[in-house]
Amino acid sequence: MDDKLSSPNQFKEQLNKFLKTDKQEIIKSLLDSNLTGRGGAGFPTGMKWDFCSKAKGDKKYVICNADEGDSGAFSDRYLLEDQPLKVIFGMILCGMVIGSDEGVLYIRGEYPKSIEAINGSINELKKLNLLGDNILGTDFSFDLGICIGQGAYICGEETALIASIEGRRAEVDVRPPFPVTEGLYKKPTVVNNVETLAAATGILINGPEKFAAIGNKKSAGTKLVCLDSFFNNPGVYEIDMGTPMKKIFNEIGGGYKEPVKAFQVGGPLGGVVPLSEIDNLNLDFQEFTAKGFMLGHASIVSIPKDFPMSEYIHHLFEFSAEESCGKCFPGRLGSYRGKEMFDQVKNKTAKIPLKLLNELLVTMQKGCLCALCGAIPTPIMNILKYFGDEMKNDMVKDN
Ligand SMILES: Cc1cc2nc3c(=O)[nH]c(=O)nc-3n(C[C@H](O)[C@H](O)[C@H](O)COP(=O)(O)O)c2cc1C
């Protein structure tokens, strides 16, 4: 993201250009770039905008998902605070393309500086007629508002996020219909992650070729990666897709301050990658998935060598039990049953019946309404696979 859209003058110049650009050309650029959503699900962004532009509706919305709840993730925060114009520009272009005059930034309340930075930019752009009614004298109007999240992880899930903006209880909805046809207030809506919108801005300003030339068709361009404080050089880095993970960890991250044995990549629903597998992985969405992990939003949380894995699993079940929206049985009850099993290990009152645990994990994977409780089995299964030896004293084989 070398081309900071850092001044309102640059913003005006670029916006002037795009106000005269054919909408289909904008969609084509995004499709040609192979940009996929950076929020975790990885849906092609050009396709999402295209679907919404074709959806019928007297009113449409653009939502920027800035709820960034994944543990270890702070890349959206960096963009909101350091490059707010890039995020807003992406929302305006999306509005132009889909035919929307209103956008909402859903920003987590724990990011007061992000809210301040975005608010400041909105006010400045409004004064310059770069936002609001009849932008730069054209018939295109687009306004932006901020909705402040209150710290529920589920509110990052797009249908729960929409419910939250509408003032309903933040529960996940069954899809279809997808938000592109029936979203906020049942109107066609694009929900995009902060990084996706900033990347779209860069692609549209620079042309799609540069982005598409990095990585491969399904994992193209660059990705912001967050390294936690176990690395000698913690921070957020923009890294080319396809870069070997060992280079990211050892060269960019500078290795580890303390001995580590695994990493949770992509938030609480992402995989737990043992240290031994790092040499076999590149920064690539499909590669992570093929090996049973998930790259997701690419936050890296290190697991210290002496941290008991049964305690880590307990934490994961406890997290989903706390954060589940409660709508589906497998999520609501499954998370609690899992937590109870590992309470017993923690209290040394019982061992885990392995078959029962596996059945619980498969039920959650198959039966949950969304990825909160449906994907929490991924890191747990990774731990059972790679740290079976460490955990064997906590388990009993049942029939
Ligand atoms: C439990 C849960 C939490 C999520 N949290 C976020 C989040 O904080 N930010 C985000 O952009 N996407 C999050 N997502 C993914 C969104 O539902 C959605 O796929 C994304 O915002 C779409 O934007 P994109 O296409 O630009 O990635 C979450 C999904 C789930 C299941």
Image (spheres, rainbow, N blue to C red):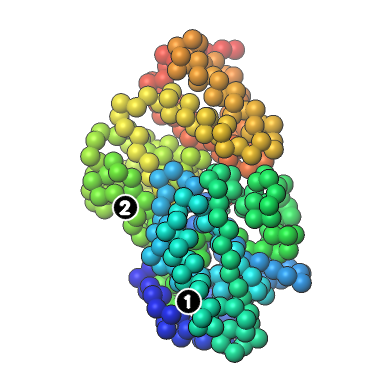
Is residue 20 in view? yes
Q: Residues within 10 Å of mark 1 (few under 14, many from 20)?
A: some
Is residue 362 in view? no
Where 278 falls versus 27 (above or below)? above
Q: CA distance from mark 1 to mark 2?
A: 29 Å
Where 230 falls versus 88 (above or below)? above
Pick whichever of labels 1 and 2 is earlier in the sequence.
1
| Apparent side of residue 83 relative to residue 275 in the rendered image (left or right) | right
The percent position of residue 99, horizontal first and vertical second, equals 67, 75
Where 114 falls versus 59 (above or below)? above
Residue under label 2: 235
Residue under label 1: 124
Residue furthest toward the top?
349
Q: Name the amino acid, label 2.
A: Gly
Of 63 and 355, nearer the camera is 63
Q: Residues within 10 Å of mark 2 (few under 14, many from 20)?
A: some
| Apparent side of residue 106 relative to residue 231 in the rendered image (left or right) | right
The percent position of residue 159, horizontal first and vertical second, equals 66, 51
Q: Secondary structure at mark 2?
A: strand
Q: Secondary structure at mark 1?
A: helix
